[in-house]
Image (cartoon, helix red, strand yellow):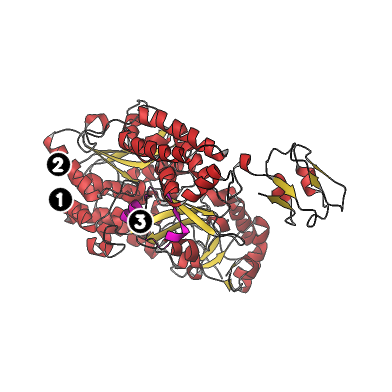
């Protein structure tokens, strides 16, 4: 019989010493049977949107109705995002790793009958290998997971993020104990320096070096030193930081505690955008439980070290991901960046030395302390150590969140983990680094993904957003889209960003309409480089990257728009025409029913016709036609 025990979420005590924490962990592990079957229902944002809470409720009811000596408690064992978002809702049986995908409430009774009672899997809910069609039973054998190296994400999908007992049982706060009882602050900084950890928020600055500079300035000018975590993730299609905050918030808190001890800080802030309500809720609960347990606040674990932090909600301004704009926002000022000639490690929040790291950077720190700098340095490439979390979205079969060693190639990431682009299409490019990144074409998909290689290729690591594009994508349109996003998000403080990006968009709009000249291409390139050199902050300095990268790798597409008045991908409306091929049209009337302009006429079971003068080129007819009769050129 299956037995699934409940885990107490209440935490009405305070751990006074490291020994008390160790004893508490031992007591938790002692009451847990490692062979016990636990049913986990993913409660990440994507799975929640696809009914995972209803799946969890249905499981509880079905188990109770079956009269089993078990209690299925997915609400208590809520987990963060498992990563395989395109297959959710996900249900995983532990410790076996039996993996069900796209589970709905109506599937639950069959799961209980076959899996819990009969001991056999429900084959139709298993992952099927796209090449062989064979079903894969366990998550560890699915290519999406098999080729990852999940270190920072190792607890997500296994622990309840707001149950401190789960975190402690999984080894949480053990690295904090190590530094507080056996390491000096300088030794901690040295270990982080030796590991080669670079910031995961976009800049890629050496984390240990930043810590040391902050600590030195703090000693030179007595007063508060601040620790900050940047969770203001705003890149289109990116959800790495959100997943960490939702799925393993204590890893972020522990990293910040270690950093605070190292640089001499007693006060910190986590800056999270308000559009992440689940992350905000989870962090609040984690902070409260850590504080109640004596892992935050005064005299932590009786060691004399004190540190506490606050959650600060951002209004959703993309520019507030920039360090000085973020600090200005916390101070209650408009989220505008300042000139970089004064560094935040010297004068940051309220004019005091401040250390800001991305939440993923903080979550790496406990791993480094636990396993050592040498272990961490052995992962990745010469200049980029460790793993990196990426959100893999766009025209790719396996959409989701992945963690891979630095140095994995674009090809391996897209094909082995992502499963390639959907059938009938060809991989064209991948946008790396968010709206300020660059598009890397298929010709360069053997490029290793690390800070330096991407920079040399005209892209950037950014926070880890990746958008896969197939041959239906127009690169002129892509450059225009990202420019429009950045124009909307710019604070407008400096002229190069405020006016320069506007002018770049005007030129791109002309190209999309089949107008312009080759001389305009040169102006666009020159203007982009001037904006990079003259802008006040990193947003403006990196904003031209999508244009520069597409000019570098897809100049032929720009020339096709300008010289031949054609959009090779058939995307730009002013350069395309829809038509109906009478030889393929069987008169199903689907296109005529859906056309908002009444531009399509014809009788049932007879070829239809499209009046080009009425067509607004919305593309609905192309989308609904199942016979390939609607053409676009």
Whether tag 3 and tag 2 are in contact, CB under 8 A, the answer is no
Helix, strand or loop status at disc 1: helix
In three-dimensional space, the C-alpha distance between marks 1 and 3, rounded to whole angstroms, equals 26 Å
Q: Specify the quadrant that holds the N terminus.
A: bottom right
In three-dimensional space, the C-alpha distance between marks 2 and 1, rounded to whole angstroms, equals 11 Å
| Residue 316 visible in the shown view | no
Task: Give the residue at mark 3.
Answer: 168
Residue toward you, 286 or 83? 83
Helix, strand or loop status at disc 3: helix
Q: In this view, does 3 lie above or below 168?
A: below
Residue located 34% across and 36% down the image: 530
Task: Give the residue at mark 1.
Answer: 186
**Magenta-highlighted residues:** 437-463
Q: In the rendering, at what x and y percent does residue 39 appear? A: 53, 62
Q: In the rendering, at what x and y percent does residue 111 appear? A: 63, 65
Q: In this view, does 582 lie above or below 66?
A: above
Q: In the rendering, at what x and y percent does residue 575 appear? A: 62, 42
Mark 2: few/some/many CA within 10 Å (<14, 14-19, 20+): some
């Amino acid at each position: 019989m299956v037995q699934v025990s409940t885990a107490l979420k209440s935490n009405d005590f305070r751990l006074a010493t490291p020994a008390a924490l160790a004893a508490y962990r031992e007591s938790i592990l002692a009451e847990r049977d490692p062979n016990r079957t636990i049913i986990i229902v993913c409660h990440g944002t994507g799975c929640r949107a696809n009914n995972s809470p209803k799946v969890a409720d249905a499981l509880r009811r079905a188990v109770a109705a079956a009269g089993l000596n078990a209690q299925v408690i997915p609400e208590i064992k809520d987990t963060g995002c498992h990563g395989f978002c395109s297959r959710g809702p996900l249900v995983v049986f532990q410790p076996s790793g039996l993996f069900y995908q796209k589970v709905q409430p109506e599937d639950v009774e069959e799961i209980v009958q076959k899996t819990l009672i009969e001991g056999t899997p429900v084959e139709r809910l298993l992952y099927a290998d796209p090449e062989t069609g064979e079903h894969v039973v366990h998550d560890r054998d699915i290519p999406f997971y098999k080729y990852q190296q999940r270190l920072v994400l190792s607890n997500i999908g296994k622990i309840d993020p707001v149950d401190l007992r789960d975190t402690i049982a999984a080894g949480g706060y053990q690295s904090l104990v190590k530094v507080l009882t056996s390491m000096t602050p300088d030794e901690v900084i040295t270990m982080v320096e030796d590991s080669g950890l670079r910031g995961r928020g976009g800049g890629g600055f050496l984390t240990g070096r930043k810590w040391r500079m902050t600590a030195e300035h703090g000693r030179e000018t007595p007063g508060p030193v601040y620790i900050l975590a940047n969770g203001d993730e705003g890149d289109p299609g990116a959800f790495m930081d959100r997943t960490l905050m939702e799925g393993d918030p204590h890893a972020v808190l522990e990293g910040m505690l270690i950093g605070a001890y190292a640089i001499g800080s007693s006060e910190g802030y986590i800056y999270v955008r308000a559009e992440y309500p689940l992350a905000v809720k989870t962090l609040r609960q984690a902070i409260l439980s850590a504080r109640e347990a004596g892992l935050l606040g005064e005299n932590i674990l009786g060691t004399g070290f004190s540190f506490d932090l606050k959650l600060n909600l951002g209004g959703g301004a993309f520019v507030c991901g920039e360090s000085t704009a973020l600090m200005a926002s916390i101070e209650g000022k408009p989220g505008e960046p300042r000139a970089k000639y004064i560094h935040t490690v010297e004068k940051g929040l309220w004019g005091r030395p401040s250390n800001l790291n991305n939440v993923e950077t903080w979550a790496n720190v406990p791993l480094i302390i636990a396993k050592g700098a040498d272990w961490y340095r052995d992962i990745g490439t010469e200049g980029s150590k460790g793993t990196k979390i990426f959100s893999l979205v766009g025209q790719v079969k396996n959409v989701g969140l992945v963690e891979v060693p630095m140095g994995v190639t674009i090809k391996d990431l897209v094909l082995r983990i992502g499963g390639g682009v959907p059938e009938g299409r060809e991989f064209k490019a991948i946008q790396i680094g968010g709206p300020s990144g660059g598009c890397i074409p298929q010709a360069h998909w053997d490029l290793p993904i690390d800070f330096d290689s991407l920079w040399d290729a005209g892209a950037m690591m950014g926070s880890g957003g990746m958008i896969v594009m197939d041959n239906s994508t127009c690169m002129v349109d892509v450059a225009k889209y990202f420019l429009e996003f950045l124009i909307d998000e710019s604070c407008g403080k400096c002229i190069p960003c405020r006016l320069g990006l506007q002018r770049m968009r005007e030129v791109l709009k002309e190209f999309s309409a089949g107008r312009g000249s080759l001389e305009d291409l040169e102006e666009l390139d020159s203007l982009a480089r001037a904006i990079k050199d003259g802008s006040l902050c990193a947003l403006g300095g990196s904003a031209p990257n999508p244009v520069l990268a597409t000019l570098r790798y897809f100049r032929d597409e720009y020339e096709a728009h300008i010289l031949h008045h054609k959009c090779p991908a058939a995307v730009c409306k002013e350069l395309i025409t829809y038509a109906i091929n009478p030889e393929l049209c069987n008169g199903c009337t689907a296109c005529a029913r859906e056309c908002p302009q009444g531009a399509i006429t014809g009788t049932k079971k007879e070829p239809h016709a499209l009046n080009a003068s009425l067509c607004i080129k919305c593309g609905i007819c192309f989308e609904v036609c199942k016979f390939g009769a609607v053409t676009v050129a």
